[in-house]
Image: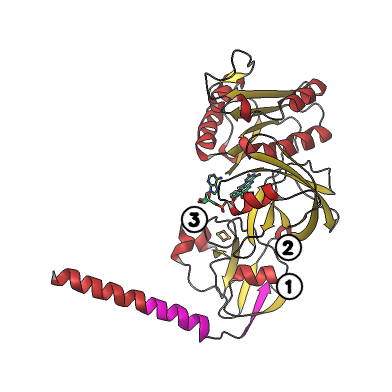
Amino acid sequence: MVYLLSVAVFGGLAIVLSGVLIVAERFLVNYGICKLDINAGEKPLEVQGGQTLLAALYANEIFIPSACGGKGSCGHCKITVPNGGGPVLPTELSYLSRQEVRANVRLACQVKIREDIFVRIPDEMLNVKLFGAEVEYAAMLTHDIRELRMRLKEPAQISQRPGQYAQIEASSPDGPVYRAYSISSPSYESDVIELMVRLVPGGVGSTYLHNLKVGDSVSFTGPYGEFYLNEDPSVEIICVGGGCGMAPMKNIIYTLYSRWPDRSCWLFFGCRTTDDVFYLKQFQQLAQKHPNFHVVYALSDESNGDGQWEGERGFIHLAVDKKLKTGVERQAFLCGPPPMIEAVTRVLEEKGVQAGDIFYDKF
Ligand SMILES: Cc1cc2nc3c(=O)[nH]c(=O)nc-3n(C[C@H](O)[C@H](O)[C@H](O)COP(=O)(O)OP(=O)(O)OC[C@H]3O[C@@H](n4cnc5c(N)ncnc54)[C@H](O)[C@@H]3O)c2cc1C
Ligand code: FES
């Protein structure tokens, strides 16, 4: 009894003390103006101390990927902080490998600026811009996936690679939130971006995008993402996805065939029922023009389709296993829920695809 009482007293004291420290830091500690040095003098800034590194960079139009909007739950905002970042926080450790910790990689949303700070940011990230756009077209692809096309206003052009994504600013009662969406329009369309958005019940970003109307204004930053399509035309490209995982695949496939009309590429698309099937006719037409393009859709609900379904049946990794031969040099891009990614990765590795040639976005 005495033991339980002392645990409760000490626990309570610890909570009160940490609360006092947070309030004191918020209202009493003034870190003043701090120097923020980017890439050893390339872009010296002066910023108000006390804010996060992510917020200070954003205020100076340096946009670091931050799919969770700075909550510390996506691990996307990694940058190198050689000096002035303070100790690595427990909240960062689940996203950083030991090697990254040794190399001073940090999560920008968790680093608070308390003194002069030195950071290294790759040139590609320094080129990410804030865009203003207008919704030009919107339509439902399935019962819960909406396609949106936005015409760029300012700047009027974007340079994006297949596999990259944009961070949309969505308004919510608690202020703006930022969410990542893959760009589905091909790279050669530089004056628009298209997205495919699945409605997450109660989700702030997806509800906002599902409610936008033609003519509405949208802000986003981008492009983000480090996927590079293999430039060697003899390397076969494998795309495997499900649901709105179609978005990056569509960009990859149309960009690919605008550059290499004879290139070999497989699209594997997993659906539960025929209600989840979209873009099939469009890809079949593309395959007629490009005989080395192979389109495989599979229904995982074995009883669905009423005998009318001519595609594959079962989970999509089974179709990958059935259709692909071994001994071909390949690069693969997978996009969908984690169990699908894991099952397909195992099959591809059995087919001889190197782990370094398999890229994925889990969502
Ligand atoms: C690199 C990248 C690319 C992405 N591309 C796309 C894309 O092309 N199309 C697309 O639709 N989404 C994409 N996403 C996911 C997208 O960023 C959002 O996470 C998603 O739309 C949910 O955001 P929300 O604001 O609507 O939900 P939130 O308000 O963030 O979440 C609301 C509730 O739903 C839960 N939840 C969040 N996400 C999911 C989910 N996927 N399934 C089930 N429950 C969930 C949360 O835990 C929470 O309880 C991508 C994510 C990343 C990291
Ligand atoms: S922005 Fe998501 S972890 Fe930092």
Which one is nearer the viewer's eye here, 241 or 354? 241
Which one is nearer the viewer's eye here, 177 or 17? 177
Q: Say which element carries label 1.
A: strand
Q: Is residue 24 magenta?
A: yes
Mark closest to the chain's N terminus, 3 or 1: 1
Which quarter shows the C terminus? top right
Determine whether label 3 and label 2 are within 8 Å by CB.
Answer: no
The percent position of residue 191, horizontal first and vertical second, equals 85, 49
**Distance of mark 3 from mark 2, alpha carbons?**
24 Å
Residue for point 80% across, 20% down: 288
The amino acid sitting under disc 3 is: Ser
Q: Is residue 334 left or right of residue 60?
A: left
Residue for point 56% across, 27% down: 316
**Distance of mark 2 from mark 1, alpha carbons?**
10 Å
Most extreme residue toward the left, as rendered? 1
Determine whether label 2 and label 1 are within 8 Å by CB.
Answer: yes
Q: Quadrant for residue 5, please give it.
A: bottom left
The amino acid sitting under disc 1 is: Lys
Q: Is residue 4 left or right of residue 197?
A: left
Q: Which residues make up the magenta segment? A: 17-39
Mark 3 surroundings: few (<14), some (14-19) or many (≥20) residues within 10 A: few
Residue 43's tag is: 1
Mark closest to the chain's N terminus, 2 or 1: 1
Mark 1 surroundings: few (<14), some (14-19) or many (≥20) residues within 10 A: few
Q: Say which element carries label 2.
A: helix
Residue for point 57% across, 51% down: 203
Residue for point 75% across, 35% down: 232
Q: Dot 2 corresponds to which residue?
A: 126
Q: Is residue 161 above or below residue 236?
A: below
Residue 339's tag is: none
